[in-house]
Amino acid sequence: MYMYLPFLTAFIGLVLVWFDRRFAGLALLALTTLILVYWFHFHATNHLNISL
């Protein structure tokens, strides 16, 4: 997975919150969290050969 993607979504969410678009910022925060959870799960299970 592209590692810049969580940083990009977090930055866009920060910009949206800066311009008083709180709901859209929270949606992008949730998307960022989901990307990071998926990224961690993929790398923790496939590359380290452990079972979560």
Image (spheres, rainbow, N blue to C red):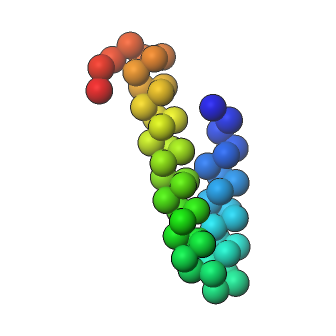
Residue at image point 67% right, 46% down: 5
Q: Tell me if residue 30 comes above or below residue 48 in the rendering.
A: below
Q: Tell me if residue 18 comes above or below residue 50 in the rendering.
A: below
Q: Tell me if residue 34 comes above or below residue 39 in the rendering.
A: below
Q: Residue furthest left?
A: 52
Coordinates of residue 32 in the picture (x, y in percent)? 55, 53
Which quadrant, please, contains the C terminus? top left
- 31 left or right, relative to 48: right
Which quadrant, please, contains the N terminus? top right
Q: Tell me if residue 21 comes above or below residue 34 in the rendering.
A: below
- 45 left or right, relative to 11: left
Residue at image point 63% right, 81% down: 21
Residue at image point 65% right, 52% down: 7
- 42 left or right, relative to 19: left
- 35 left or right, relative to 9: left
Coordinates of residue 35 in the picture (x, y in percent)? 53, 45
Coordinates of residue 4 in the picture (x, y in percent)? 69, 44
Q: How many marks?
A: 0
Q: Residue furthest bottom?
A: 20
Residue at image point 47% right, 27% down: 42
Nearest the viewer among 42 and 48 is 42
Coordinates of residue 18 in the picture (x, y in percent)? 67, 81
The answer to which quarter of the image holds residue 27 is bottom right
